[in-house]
Image (cartoon, rainbow, N blue to C red):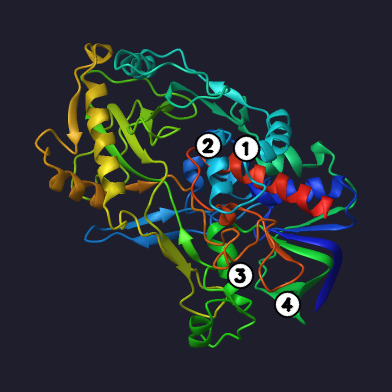
Amino acid sequence: METLRADYIVVGSGAAGAVLARRLAEGQAGRVLLVEAGPPDTADPRIRRLADYDALIGSAYDFGYSVARSGVPGRLAHPRGKVLGGSTSTNTCIWFLPPASDLDRWAAEGATGWDAAAMAPALDWLAAAMPVEPFAPDDPAARAWIEACVQAGFPQVDFARPFAEGVGWLRLNARGGLRQSAAVVWLDPASRPPPNLQIVTGWEVERVEVAGRRAVAVAGGGRRAEAAREIVLACGAFNTPKLLWLSGIGPAAELRALGLPVVADLPGVGAGLQEHADAGVNWRAARAPARLDPWNWSSCLFARLDPAEPFADVQLHLGTTGFNRYTVPAGWPAVTEGFSALVNLLRPKSRGRVRLASPDPGAPPVIEPGYFTDPEGADMARVLEGIALARRLSAMPAFAGWGLTEVAPGPELRDSEALADFVRRTHSTDYHPCGTVRMGSDPAAPLTPDLKLRGIAGLRVADASVFPSQVSVNTAASCMAVGSRAAELILSG
């Protein structure tokens, strides 16, 4: 068996892993080995072309995870990048730094040292390092959404500055239609990575080896790598708990039922899954909006439906085309020439989990999202408020010349029970899973606030798994900030 050796091993080259590995190597931490399950991001020209993002879902560069939809044909995709750069090499590059209120909430939830003030150096470094440009097309249909939101009383804001609510043009970590992924910015040879950083692609790690309550190596596929100091898992909210379970770290009873050895009984590994669920409203237009490059969603609205909240509680992705991916299989007509609003629940109260159904490392994890399962029904109520807001926006004077006709859910669906059924049958996800190996100060948290796994020395986690609760924006930048903060903790320790 081939054996590699390093001081630090980082498993997973996505948003957090790429940043962490680069910053560790630059900080003279010793030899850093970064392991990626997929190929280099230069393997296919579509990977770096942002307009081709949709073609990457279900491709060889995607783990291809999905979940069944209750009573509706087809499955709900949960794509995860299997390529250098992880999901930053396959996503839509929407760029939002986490609001201060989210980070302060993390600290209040037990993630000591992760408040906004403590995270400021990592966020400042990230804002300076990542190339970001606004997506503001000179298009009347796209401008109609901005104007409608302003007419409805929302401020137009610049998302490069702090805000609590408002409508604005999206900002993308892209340049000239080419994505600026974590791989491009921190791992590409053009970025001049330090010589003590070794990158290995095409290696899917199957287990962490533990000796005497200390993580000492990772192995799988005929390869092995030993870590003199630490191993950091950065495989994402689905694959990090999967790898921990395969290594005997998780709920003891379930591990035994699978025939896996129990190395550490940590019931919280795989629990606490949170996701940004959304529901789409589609309108047919009397005249066709133009096709935009790279896609027809150029703006969004953050709306604070509960005025007591410090930050918006729903986000509306505003499109100048229909969003048909899940409405059509559920029986609603397609909209090819029209508008759409995806109502995104920002801070869900519902929780799901990730577990294993098989000890086979090649089997996918079982994803149980738990959408709209909170006992009070608050998540569904908030999404229905968002649908009502989307309908109000469509009636603003900005759309007077477009001749909008609501197709989904349709004007006949007005009562809350019928609309809730529509949401359950057609909802989507923003591909932002988190929270499955959360950090905290309570014993039920698998990680301590310095990202160390309880009961196992030399092993940390640094990716969206660690979030104590969901952030109120798209998650890529928050994951990069976790990677940067993790490097600070390791280098200072």
Residue under label 3, please give it.
Answer: 243
Q: Mark 1 to mark 3: distance in Å? A: 30 Å
- Marks 4 and 1, Cα distance to the nearest angstrom? 35 Å
Name the disc covering residue 209, or none.
4
**In this figure, which residue is indicated by the disc labeled 1?**
116
Rate crowding at label 3 as few (under 14), some (14 to 19) or many (20 or more) other CA atoms within 10 Å: many
Read off the residue under disc 2.
101
- x 49%, y 84%: residue: 253
Q: Nearer the viewer, mark 4 or mark 1?
A: 1
Q: Tell me the crowding category of disc 4: few under 14, some 14 to 19, or many 20 or more residues within 10 angstroms, Cα based.
A: some
x and y percent of residue 367 in the render?
Answer: 43, 64
Amino acid on which the number 1 mark rests in the picture: Ala
Question: Which comes before the other along the chain, label 2 or label 3?
Answer: 2
Q: CA distance from mark 2 to mark 3?
A: 32 Å
Could you say which is closer to the camera, residue 38 or residue 116? 116
Q: Is residue 113 above or below residue 321?
A: below
Find out whether the residues at labels 2 and 3 contact each other: C-beta distance under 8 Å: no
Q: Amino acid at mark 3?
A: Leu
